Image (tube, grey):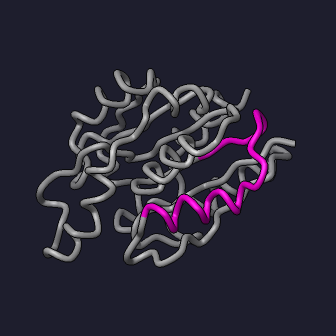
Amino acid sequence: MKRVFIIHGWGGFPEEAWFPWLKQKLQEKGIEAFVPAMPDTEKPQIAKWVSFLSEQIAKPDQETYLVGHSIGVQTILRYLQTINQPIGGVLSVAGFYTLKDTTYQDASERDIAKPWLEMLIDNDLVKQNAGKITAIFSDDDPYIDLENVEFFKQRLGAKTVVLSGKGHMGQSEGFKEISEILNELLKIIQ
């Protein structure tokens, strides 16, 4: 049975933005969908988030698909380094390798983000385990610079899609559904 895990971002939660809509659309198609509440969401830590994701997935296989938003994408990439089993695919929404300097409200936020930005990702291992990868960005994301489009292409061989006017595609923009997310995910799953 196909399973999709939707991983929210920093400060996020399962009922945020387009997550419930995507979960419902997948379930209508007979696909199991999960949106776990990630631990310590206001102070995300790599080890805690990757370990928690690993527990949620339990046994990854080629019927496992991962969707991440923002730091949830980072979590997925880092998780994929820890398994020795290819999965079906990954959809990155507002994922990043770098962040804009204007992302942080204060030094404590910069400290939380620092390990996520500085601890290297083994992109070759991620590619080996990720299956198909598509990365969606917005041309006006206040946190994610569009240089990340090239990073995802070059480092992960990802198909990339740049939407117009969707911001960070999270809670603050108030999007309850983004059809491109569902459409691109279904292309990965089929």
Rendered residue at 68%/31% (across/down): 86
Describe residue 61's horizontal placement relative to residue 185 as left or right: right
Task: Identify whether 77 is placed above or below 171.
Answer: above
**Who is closer to the viewer here, 78 or 137?**
78
Q: Position of residue 98 (x, y in %)?
A: 24, 45
Q: Quadrant of the N terminus?
A: top right
Location of residue 45 by image quarter: bottom left
Describe residue 74's horizontal placement relative to residue 183 as left or right: left
Rendered residue at 59%/62% (across/down): 51
Q: Position of residue 162 (x, y in %)?
A: 35, 33
**Who is closer to the viewer here, 4 or 121?**
121
Number of marks present in the image shown: 0
Does residue 102 show up magenta in the picture?
A: no
Rendered residue at 29%/46% (across/down): 165
Task: Identify whether 161 is placed above or below 180.
Answer: above
Describe residue 23's horizontal placement relative to residue 96 as left or right: right
**Who is closer to the viewer here, 44 or 26?**
44
Location of residue 108 by image quarter: bottom left
Task: Identify whether 22 is placed above or below 162.
Answer: below
Q: Quadrant of the C terminus?
A: top right
Q: Position of residue 159 (x, y in %)?
A: 46, 24
Provide the residue span drawn in magenta.
Answer: 46-66
Rendered residue at 59%/72% (across/down): 37
Q: Position of residue 30 (x, y in %)?
A: 85, 46
